[in-house]
Amino acid sequence: MKDEDFIGLYEVAKMAGVTSAAVANWRSRHPDFPAAIYELKSGPVFNTEQIRKWLKKRRAKMVTIISTINLKGGVGKTTTTVALGEVLAEAFRKRVLIIDLDPQTNATIMLIGEEKWEELNRQGYTLATLFKDALNETDNFDLSKTLQKGVSNVRDVRTLDLIPSSLDLIDVQDRLASMPSGRFFTNNPTEVLRRAVKPILDEYDYVLIDCPPNLGLITLNGLRISDGYIIPTIPDVLSTYGIPQIISRMGAFAANIGEPIEPYGILITKYDSRSPLHDRTIKQLREDQPPIVFKTVIPQRTTTAEAAEFAEVNTLRQKYGYEGQYDRFYGICKEIMEIAG
């Protein structure tokens, strides 16, 4: 055989357009991944043609990417995103990445604390730098330094990573529509995030994107790479008012880019069992589906709000209290995994 008939991990990653870590993840997750021809000290060696055929057969992404969105703030969107990421990582042993697109940076601070965020923000290691590059035609964004590995204030959560946000996104999102089109008119304001994170996506089982409470270009960047989205909502009039607009806009956006973005479901948050309004709203939402309303609901609990504080704890039950909140988030994770396949 010729030398070109063999290929190492680095060359496989280059062929697939991902990182070597992603290829190593494929080997452990997919039984049909081609076996190594040789195991050298420098790493495994594969048959080039077998790898090429496997990549061609498995063109679908190995990762499930889910956005969380609601047009109204204060519905528990960020807390839900962080809790789901932590439970998927700890209870289900998944590799999870949270991308914080919300300029309020709440998910970022929940996962790394305010002091660490301020340090990263000063150094430019947030998503604001990525979008400023798109506007100014610069190249300052460093994904390797921006990506924060092993985040969370919970000791038992070990496989959760974060790409942090910045308050500077508030200014950037208003100007993104005016970004230069590029030398060959290939720059698209909804493709900025996808181009930046594509090399690392297949290192994860799940990517959760915390979107801003609007349907602007920053939000569309998150939805552009998503397989589907979840709508967390309080079951009241104001919180559910924008749901039809979200579904309609996302359907039109998906049709425009020629790729499906599925509405995975509506997640009821801050539920008050004493409120007739909440019960009526949930009943109406279930009758109006699609999208479905998840069976598991998240009740209003002070412990959930307190979980936003970045304080070291040992377990997720400690973080979210002992009133059943952890079990609720566990149940939502199971429903999401079934729906998303």
Image (cartoon, rainbow, N blue to C red):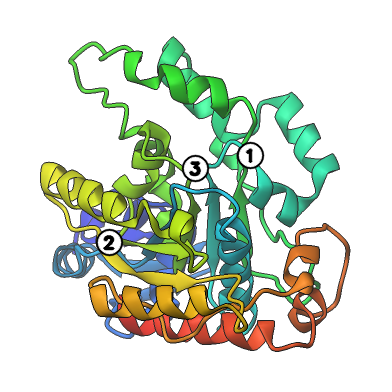
Picture quadrant of residue 110: bottom right
- Assess disc 1: are there few (<14), some (14-19) or many (≥20) residues with their C-alpha within 10 Å of its C-alpha: some
User: Can you give x and y, in whole percent of width and height, for residue 72 in the image?
Assistant: 49, 48
Q: Can you tell which quarter of the image residue 294 is in?
A: bottom left
Tell whether 58 sits left or right of 132.
left
Tag nearer the camera, 1 or 2: 1
Chain-order first, disc 1 or disc 3: 1
Q: Are marks 1 and 3 in contact (CB under 8 Å)?
A: yes
Identify the residue under disc 1.
104
Relative to residue 111, is residue 36 depicted above or below?
below
Tag 3, which secondary structure?
loop
Q: Secondary structure at mark 1?
A: loop
Q: Secondary structure at mark 2?
A: strand
The spot of residue 125 in percent (x, y) is: 65, 32
Q: In terms of sequence position, does the residue under pointer 2 or pointer 3 come before the other?
A: 2
Q: Residue at x 23, y 66 (%)?
A: 51
The residue most toward the front is: 276
Separation of marks 1 and 3 at Cα, in angstroms: 8 Å
Q: Are marks 1 and 2 in contact (CB under 8 Å)?
A: no
Q: Is residue 212 above or below residue 205?
A: above
**Amino acid type indicated by mark 3:** Pro
Report x, y in % for residue 227: 29, 61
| Numbered circle sitting on residue 212 | 3
Q: Position of residue 332 (x, y in %)?
A: 49, 81
Q: Foreground mark, 2 or 3?
A: 3
* Residue that carries the numbered disc 2 in the rendered image: 6
- How many angstroms separate mark 1 from mark 2 (CA)? 49 Å
Residue found at x 55% / y 28%: 169
- Quadrant showing the C terminus: bottom left
Q: Is 48 on the left or on the right of 63, as rendered?
A: left
At a point 44% along the width and 47% down the height, the residue shown is 71
